[in-house]
Amino acid sequence: MAREAATLLYSGAEKEYKQAKTHAAQTLGTHFLPSNLEVALELDKIAEENEGKNRKERLIEMRKEALAVMKLLDSYSPLLIGSVWRGTIRRGSDIDIAVYADDPQAVVDILKSQCISVLKTAWTRVNKHGRTLSSLQIEAETSAKHRLEIVIRNCAEQGEKRRCEIFGDEIKGLKTKELDKLLKANPTEKFVPY
């Protein structure tokens, strides 16, 4: 079941985990739904089987590009999150970085001044435990044409623990110095709960 849902996600037939799991259950004629973690682990296996050595090279390249962007934004406490942090990239993955700023436009200005192609910006709001949190989402493109998504959160949110909806663990991510050290020591290391 998890493999079927992961195949739907990998092929692009489904975009979201919930829909992929429901579609897989209908296809296989069952009501059982696997966990997001089970699907994510299968998705990682499928990506490895299909992308092989190129996947590791792309991961290193994406982590290097993430580091360059994070160094530009170092005064905003950047944190590499998502599949590039975890080491579970697949074709179409983007680089996800969270930063903390009370003036989001300053972050946008830095990116533009460094010739990073900012494609779109949009405010999002979510309700978490009775609080409404807003953040600015920036979609951009790196010089190597990798998609880059930067979420700018309020400084007051820095240090708050966040739980990953896919893997179920705490999103720890990598700070600039941690990513730099990782790239020198073990550039393809994975951060996945097993």
Image (cartoon, rainbow, N blue to C red):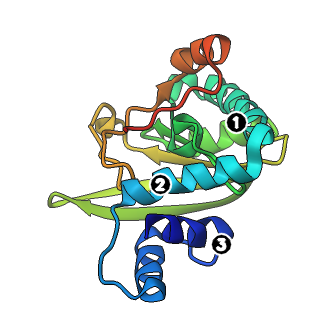
Quadrant for residue 107, please give it.
top right
Marks 2, 1: nearer the viewer: 2
Quadrant for residue 129, please give it.
bottom left
Quick one: SS at disc 2?
A: helix
**Relative to 174, is 154 on the left or the right?**
left
Type of residue at label 2? Answer: Ala
Crowding at dot 2, Cα within 10 Å, few <14 / some 14-19 / many 20+, comes out as many
Label whose residue precedes the other's in the sequence (1 or 3): 3
Crowding at dot 1, Cα within 10 Å, few <14 / some 14-19 / many 20+, comes out as many
Q: Which residue appears at 62% of the width and 55% of the height?
A: 46
Type of residue at label 1? Answer: Leu
Q: Which residue appears at 58% of the width and 50% of the height?
A: 45
Quick one: SS at disc 3?
A: loop
- In the figure, 98 relative to 36: above or below? above
Disc 1 target residue:
59
User: Residue 40's mark?
Assistant: 2
3 and 2 marks in contact (CB < 8 Å): no
Type of residue at label 3? Answer: Gly
Label whose residue precedes the other's in the sequence (3 or 2): 3
How far apart in space, not on screen, are marks 3 and 2 (Cα)?
A: 14 Å
Q: Can residue 43 be seen in this view?
A: yes
Disc 3 target residue:
12
